[in-house]
Amino acid sequence: MMVGGAQYTHLLSLAEEGFSHINAKTPTPQPLLRTAERRPNPLRAHKWRRYFNHVHSAPLARAARSRAISISSRATATVPTPAPAPTPSRAADSRFLLGLAEPELQQLALDFGQQRYRGKQLHQLIYKSKIREIRDFLQLPQSFRNDLEEAGWKVGRSSVHSVVRAADGTIKILIKLEDDRLIETVGIPVEEDSGSLRLTACVSSQVGCPLRCSFCATGKGGFSRNLQQHEIVEQVLAIEELFKNRVSNVVFMGMGEPMLNLKAVLGAHRCLNKDVQIGQRMITISTVGVPNTIKKLATYKLQSTLAVSLHASNQKLREKIVPSAKSYPLQAIMKDCKDYFLETGRRVSFEYTLLAGVNDEVEHAVELAELLHSWGRGSHVNLIPFNPIEGSEYRRPYKKAVLAFAAALKTEEIPVLRRIHGGLDALEELSQLRNVFKNSRILTAIQMVTWKSSEVISIHACLHQDYELAFCNFKVE
Ligand code: SF4
């Protein structure tokens, strides 16, 4: 799910109960600088690679593999899917500490000839002190730090490319990944009545999204790849750093469809819960619906919220708004949601983006209520008035229409949450920045086509995967 457009408003609904402006209490974000990279000693690196290949234990081997291998392509074949997600090439040789549990870090320390308590120190350095580079783990012996780096280990933190703050204190950041791709993360601060800060992080699970919901800016931008587990966790740490505060809630509603990257999402969920110490009930996983994945998620019996984006009250309308709905009929989704509740005891919440003149009539509300009632009582609906994006055919509904829709649901005894919020302009600037960055890469690549025709094939491949430009648009001089 994407937060850049309409979903942003819903995020506020998750983050707030009576949102108030707290701008004065939140710190000004500071630029996050990476220290210069050291060149590893090739001889020592070779020694440790041999060590890894031949000596280290099975659990560590599994841990190392899970860090080094990019997340597999989507598990379900029934949703229209793009070409397999490319692996981030530079990350493929790296092993990432971020995402490892304390026992795994203790095993890692033992495998490097250190004492077990060094693993506990590693855990604190990564998750509490949030130190970004192994070389800065000053509590650890220099030799251990060197050995880790030379064996290809990294913390797994990326740099912050840009930060934009909205008037209400919400911050949207662009994180630049190891392979230079950009992802968006949003931090939403809400001051509680008690004066404490509730900070919600809205995290991305993919670079782009293959599902192409017709109202969504991310869907229009195409799909690049799945995020790895550490790339999801680091978004939460980045929000904590910028706000100088603990994140209390996490919603998987940034770029991408979490269910298409379930392995990494579940790994990140475990880490956020156990290592970053965010309660399971404070985490929401959102989906537009991918066949078989709700059933699969139910088997994990998470105490987190599942939010299903319906956006329509009947199948025909849903197919227009959400193209992937063709392969996962509404009735099948509702049955899976009911089974999810029976399996986990957690009610599913339903998202509904209101699009003017498309799905915002009172008749739609009544039909939606009938649908929800037919699958059991207690369903909860979050109404999200569409926030217009450039080039979109959709319009934001008038407030009157939103109120009428909400009232109709309430009359039908459906609990409904509705949020309308300003302050989006600054956040949209950041989306535009991402596009500028993306376009600058396209221009560079086009120039290279002109200069070096031998690289045409690889550049075409890159552009096709990243930016979905048609090959026929290129002429090689
Ligand atoms: S699932 Fe749909 S709404 Fe969510 S990010 Fe993908 S295209 Fe956008």
Image (spheres, grey):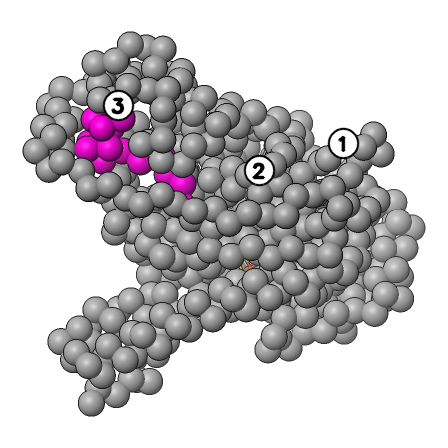
Q: Which mark is residue 36?
A: none
Q: Which residues are magenta?
A: 145-158
The residue singled out by tag 1 in the image is 196
Tell me the crowding category of disc 3: few under 14, some 14 to 19, or many 20 or more residues within 10 angstroms, Cα based.
Answer: some
Q: Is residue 60 above or below residue 153?
A: above
Residue 142 tag number = 3
Q: Earlier in the sequence, mark 1 or mark 3?
A: 3
Relative height, residue 351 to residue 296 (above, below): below
In front here: 379 or 102?
Answer: 102
Res. 165 visible in picture: yes
Q: Neighbour class for label 1 at 10 Å: few (<14), some, many (≥20)?
A: few
| Callout 3 amino acid | Gln
Q: Amino acid at mark 1?
A: Ser
Which one is in front in this view, the residue at disc 2 or the one at disc 3? 3
Q: Quadrant of residue 25?
A: top right
Q: Residue at image x 29%, y 74%?
A: 445
Viewed as shown, does residue 24 lie left or right of 472? Answer: right
Number of the label disc, if any, that sits on residue 240: 2
Assess whether mark 3 and mark 2 are in contact (beta carbons under 8 angstroms).
Answer: no
